[in-house]
Image (spheres, rainbow, N blue to C red):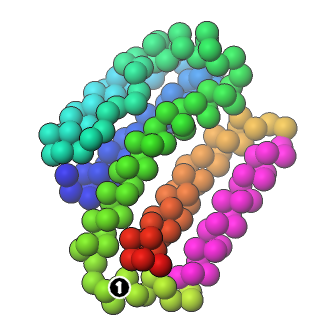
Amino acid sequence: MESIELKELLKNIQKLQSIMIAVATNSQEYRIQDKEDEYTELYQEITSQIEDLQYQGFPIQNPNIFHSLWDWYRHWKSKLTKSAFRGGYIHNLYQNFCNQIDIALCKNYVKVTSQEVLDNELEPTQIEELKAKIEKLQEIMIEIATESNTISLIQYNDENYRKLYQEVWFKIEIFRETGI
């Protein structure tokens, strides 16, 4: 599977996670009935993408056993009584899976990128940019940990946090792959 396809899979997973978190933490605004079709279509697309990866030799399984939002609802109603637990559960559900995809993307990037470009990753400006992103991640985590309205704050910061986290993680993996 090409890097573009892997990135599309990660994007689809993030959309699916967002839907699952939204209906589980803000059911007045995001009703299962209104999101079910979008969810099941996305779930089937992700399943197909994972099957393609398995066919190509990736030893991965879809960690999401919730074929519908109603399956997810029954699970969280009986086992995850607090909204914050639900969001954490969904993030953790795909963590190892997404890490495997990120590692594959990073290895492919290092493989197809010239040494000159990889050396540029070590430039002081690149290191300072990485440091600034790490500090921003820390700010978001501290803000969420210390605010009283965590659910809306998490929803507000979720996409930015994920993007920053992936960028930082990817840079660090590049360093690992190149032996730094």
User: From the viewer's perspective, is residue 85 above or below residue 166?
Assistant: above
* Furthest residue in direction front, as rendered: 179
User: From the viewer's perspective, is residue 84 above or below residue 77?
Assistant: below
Q: Is residue 136 magenta?
A: yes
- The residue positioned 71% from the left and 54% from the top of the image is 140
Q: Amino acid at mark 1?
A: Val
Q: Which residue is mark 1?
A: 117
Q: Quadrant location of residue 23?
A: top right
Q: Using the image as rendered, state which of residue 156 and residue 8 is in the foreground.
A: 8
Q: Is residue 60 magenta?
A: no
- Answer with left or right where residue 62 lies relative to residue 80: left
Q: Quadrant location of residue 110?
A: bottom left
Give the magenta-colored segment's residue range. 126-147
Say how many tags the image has: 1
- Answer with left or right where residue 47 lies relative to residue 89: left
Residue 145 % position (x, y): 79, 45
Magenta part mainly helix, strand or loop? helix
- The residue positioned 32% from the left and 33% from the top of the image is 61
- The residue positioned 31% from the left and 65% from the top of the image is 107
